[in-house]
Image (spheres, grey):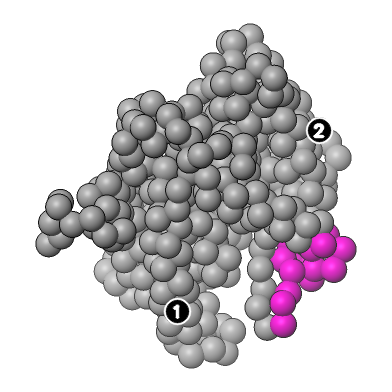
Amino acid sequence: MMSRAERSHLGDWWWTVDRALLAGLGVLMTAGLVFLMAGGPPVAERLGLPTFHFLNRQVMYLLPTIALILAVSFLSLRHIRRMALVTYGLGIVLCIAATKYGPEIKGAHRWIQFGPIGVQPSEFVKPAFVILAAWAFAEGARRRDMPGGTLAILLLPMTIVPLILQPDFGQTMLVTMVWCCMVFVAGLHWFWVAGLGGAGLLGVAAAYEFLPHVRARITRFMDKESGDNFQTFWSQESFNSGGWFGTGPGEGVAKRHLPDAHTDFIFSVAGEEFGVIVCIGIVLLFCFIVMRGLVLARRSDDIFCRLAITGLTALFGLQACINMAVNTRLMPAKGMTLPFISYGGSSLISLALGMGFLIALTRRRPRTTLLNRDEGLAQ
């Protein structure tokens, strides 16, 4: 155990970090490996890969993931903003480059290749966007000469336009919902909140009208007989087959039919083999992390920290909700991973960046540190 009297950087970090958040994330990562042992082998066999190919790669991805969470959690508020600015700029450039030079996968250009390594830049834009929007809102509230609110409003179209061009309607919807949560916490009048909600509905209607793949997904969701519902059928069947207590590890059948059993539909695999009881436990774990983040946001005296913590927590929670809603057929398919449980390198590393920001922002800081604002907030 570390003594409270120890004044090293590690000692300061240990006694100021929220260990409940760290524990929750650790349990999620462990659960992800267990579920991937069930969902990964059938997909690997279909692709002619070694049985535990995806599990082994996930373990390899988790090493830099954990390292990045810990490294980012040491950052000061000023360095968090600087890192977010650089990440956002590079991410937007790569998102635009992906629309022109990225490979087409399932009708979209969301990835960009660096030799053998594929990166989905939109994943890294999301946490950086939250930090920058929180900074803009906070500065607008502190300084009348700073058009922070206008900048925060402009950040939204700057972020979602490249996503729409890919096209990636799921990420666009997620970023917009997170931004609306931050606007609400920033104190916008209910009239404007309602207006934003109406604009969001108009956006969904426009996407349905002008984007064929969005129309096809919504139509298949509303009418089972209108098209191919192969994945949604087997995801629903997995919960019916598993019941409350599951068929047992390795005994599932639906995973042999689901092409994305290791990524988008790993929650369904868990439902079949481990039962609804375990799935409820995973939902409660996500709820614990989200509620813990919101409690820490409420306790914060700093406007920037409060907004950023709220945004990052909403980003994490809404992504989990969308994935689980798709698996249980409460929403049309979105192609969104379940945080720290689904397989994926870009997803894990971007989540590590976001959770590293969250842990750094929720660290207990002396009031004088917040008042000094790290020797100049605008730097």
Q: Is residue 98 magenta?
A: yes
Locate residue 208 relative to residue 220 in the image: left or right: right
Residue 109 point in image, percent of width and height:
78, 62
Q: Residues within 10 Å of mark 2 (few under 14, many from 20)?
A: few
Up the image or down, 269 lies above or below 225; here it is below
Badge 1 or badge 2: first in the primary sequence: 1
| Pick the front one: 282 or 232 | 282
In what element is the residue under mark 2? helix
Depth order, front residue of 300/76: 76
Task: Specify the segment rendered in magenta.
Answer: 97-115
Residue 103 shows up from this direction: yes
- Residue beneath the point at 26% across and 59% down: 8
Q: Which residue is mark 1?
A: 60
Q: Quadrant of residue 114?
A: bottom right
Task: Give x and y (percent) for residue 137.
Answer: 60, 27
Cα–Cα span, label 1 and label 2: 41 Å
Q: What amino acid type is highlighted by mark number 2?
A: Ala
Residue in view at x 37 percent, y 75 percent: 37
Locate residue 185, reporting x and y percent.
50, 23
Is residue 41 at all visible to an observer of this figure?
no
Q: Quadrant of the N terminus?
A: bottom left
In this figure, which residue is indicated by the disc labeled 2?
A: 206
Task: Inspect the image, locate mark 1, and give the three-letter code of the amino acid beneath it.
Answer: Met
Q: Residue drawn at (41%, 74%), measured in percent from left and top?
A: 63
The residue that appears at 59% across and 84% down in the rendered structure is 47
Q: Quadrant of the C terminus?
A: top right
